[in-house]
Image (spheres, helix red, strand yellow):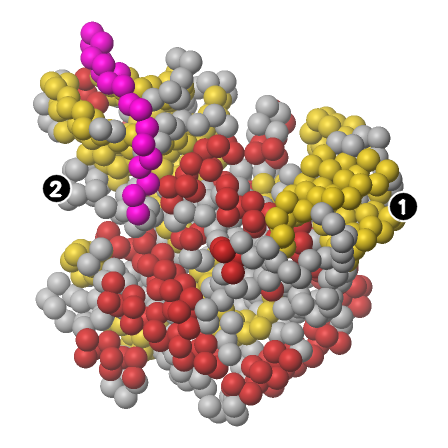
Amino acid sequence: MFGKMLDFKQDGQRVTVTFVEKEVMISVYTSTIWNVFVSMDGSIQESNAIEGNKMLDTAVKVEQIEDHLEISTDQVTAKIYDDCKIDFYDGAGNLKCEDYRGERKYQSILSQEMIDLAKQEGHDLGMREDFHYKIEVVKSVCADECFYGLGDKTGFLNKRGYDYEMWNTDNPMPHEDNFKVLYKSIPFFMSQSSRGTYGIFFDNSYHSYFDMAKENDAYCFFGADEGNLDYYYFGADGFKEIIKDYTYLTGRTPLPQLWTLGYQQSRWGYVTENDVREVASKMREFRIPCDVIHLDIDYMQGYRVFTWNKDRYKDPKQTISDLAKDGFKIVTIIDPGVKKDEDYYIYQEGVEHDYFAKTPKGEIYENVVWPGTSVYPDFGQRRVQEWWSDKHKFLVDMGVRGIWNDMNEPASFEGELPPEVVFHDHDKETTHAKIHNVYGHLMCQATYEGMRKYDKRRPFVITRACYSGTQKYSTAWTGDNHSLWSHLRMAIPQLCNLGLSGMNYVGTDIGGFGSDTTKELLCRWIQVGIFSPLCRNHAAAVRKQEPWQFDTETADIYRKYVELRYQLIPYLYDLFKETQSTGLPMIRPLILEYPEDAAARQLNDEFMFGSSILAAPVVEQGQTARMVYLPEGTWVDYHTGETILGPIRFIKDAPLDICPIYLKAGSIIPNYTVQNYIGEKEQSTLILQVIKGNGTYYHYQDDGESFAYENGVYNEYKFTITDQGLFTAEMTASGYKNRYKKLKVVYENREVLIDILEGDHWSVLL
Ligand code: MIG
């Protein structure tokens, strides 16, 4: 493609290699993070995913060896050949990731006659006529290679054999395995094979394409028709290290406020103040713990963002403060579409200051969303983001505690925004084609900054559209799923792959958004939902699916699992703490914890919650028993206390109220007592579920709300257990004055209370 290699020039950690056709810049960010960049459209390298200078001082060696150039750090060597073929090796010289040398070719070619026939019936043969992308990187694939990541795509955990695209899309049809796009564009994937592991991040925000050995078993490729060739290679050993590197580059989920980990109730259709108050009182009446109620578009004045409907709420501030007394926090939806209305302040300000996207002719671009004819803020201009941030003061002053960003693909009812609509990117004029996939990301950034400025606590933002790096600003939900068993099944690999892609504060609409849920489906969904970092029941206006809408049994099962969630809050918070320093997800496919276990590679219906808890939920209608796989090690059945030795496959009885859950030997799992909402009861005794075995666990404690932890205002406790039952506790940080008074250690049906008010080191033989 680029011709013969002519020359190279080293400038510190950047090496520019000149080929007949192009100049290729290879940059070493760290010894395991490398970038390959070729300006294809004449523009400079710029990213919406990566902020600040991420290059760390790294020793780089460059050598011309016969037919190739060798660039090395202590952990990665790249060999570069004519035509810009690049092969990556590890520090020991093992080939990890190799550019494919042949031509791309469909593995199974049909005769022209058959193609014509199939087309007559409207079949999509998945073959591109023009075949090659302008930007195209093809990597060879081994027989046993599996692929993971790619954000929120449908289908299964292992992406091998499928192809996807990146183009944020709001498609209300039930998302099936053959969907190429959903709401998010996270162009990052990881590969595992007998060669080891590697990761790739293709930082190109235009419509892009990923083929994971579908077209041909011998290779995978990624490509785009516009923008630059700009990809990162991650050469660290193992997925955990690669995720750490990827999230070092694109950012990590910051520590959230503790209450955001609580249960959240939502529905499109809580129209009036009374509707909201009723939901709140029902949650308490049914004793189902709940921290958050979401207000969908109904609360606004004619769907005008940053307004409140006066007919539906007598005094919204009062309503919110009444609910707050009972522990409820209110999150309001905000869409990007601004109603075209000369009498509406947001529209007026936007027109006056020129904040909206334009047609190529220079008129404000219009499309239709909920408020009718609407216009789109141009978030690629810093001043527009700042304006939008400031608008959140209105909501914060009302007492709103979090913002739910919807429709930010951006969605539009009258056809997709044409590619040539004029937006900005990094304040430079560009087109919708380039900004589309980062539009939601930029909106989240503005929202985060607004909440940080006015609310001052750790911002809580939820988004539907994302790009790589959105995890720095927002949590996400998987958009409009349906109340279908296939969507409950899909939730597991989908959340796992989002987590592997750096986006780990995520959840699905529990119960399903579209279509109609059943009692059984709702019960099974909450059993998955409590392990989703974001735990929210949400539905379309068509059906009421709050837990009490069915029967007592449903409410009881629902309560049992939401209570379990509330018990596990300190454990979940510890996982968030871990995420902040490593990028590792809370909800994990088994492959992440057991990379050597072949059985884990394709496991779609089980997952880990951190490294101590394994959940094997029932995701099939009518099933009351299921096959469970436990990897190597000793496990304890959460419900029965029975000890099981893995690796093993067995059938577990799982009637409607049982979600099979297993705890790993040597685990120490912190628990709180159940409460109606987080903070209702002072948790002065920390409960520790200790599972026989050898283990160490760090527990983190802070005020759960402010940024004081950044200045050392937190406690950290180190707990250990030995096989002989010796339990020790130690304070490894004690900057937060409000420490626990007691530890209640629960071990093999025994309970031991340890007073920890005095001193900083305690031990007990259990
Ligand atoms: O076109 O605000 O995904 O959660 O309830 C529908 C109404 C617009 C889509 C969101 C959904 C929300 C709904 N919204």
Q: Which residue is pictured at 29% across the width and 76% down the height?
A: 373
Q: Is residue 467 left or right of residue 700?
A: left
Which contiguous range is marked in magenta? Answer: 52-70
- Measuring from the top left, give residue 280's x and y in whole percent: 65, 77
State the residue position of label 2: 42
Q: In front here: 530 or 375?
A: 530
Instruction: Give the spatial CA distance, label 2 vs label 1.
Output: 69 Å
Q: Amino acid at mark 2?
A: Gly
Q: Is residue 438 left or right of residue 748?
A: left
Query: Is 60 inside the magenta-drawn segment?
Result: yes
Q: Which picture quadrant has residue 122?
A: top left
Q: Is residue 206 above or below residue 411?
A: above
Residue 566 position by quadrant: bottom right
Image coordinates of residue 368 in percent, x first then y, are: 31, 72
- What residue does disc 1 label? 750
Is disc 2's CB within 8 Å of ligand 1?
Answer: no
- Tell me residue 1's x, y (percent): 17, 25
Which amino acid is tagged 1? Arg
| Residue appearing at x 51%, y 86% in the figure | 316
> Residue at position x 81%, y 47% from top?
745
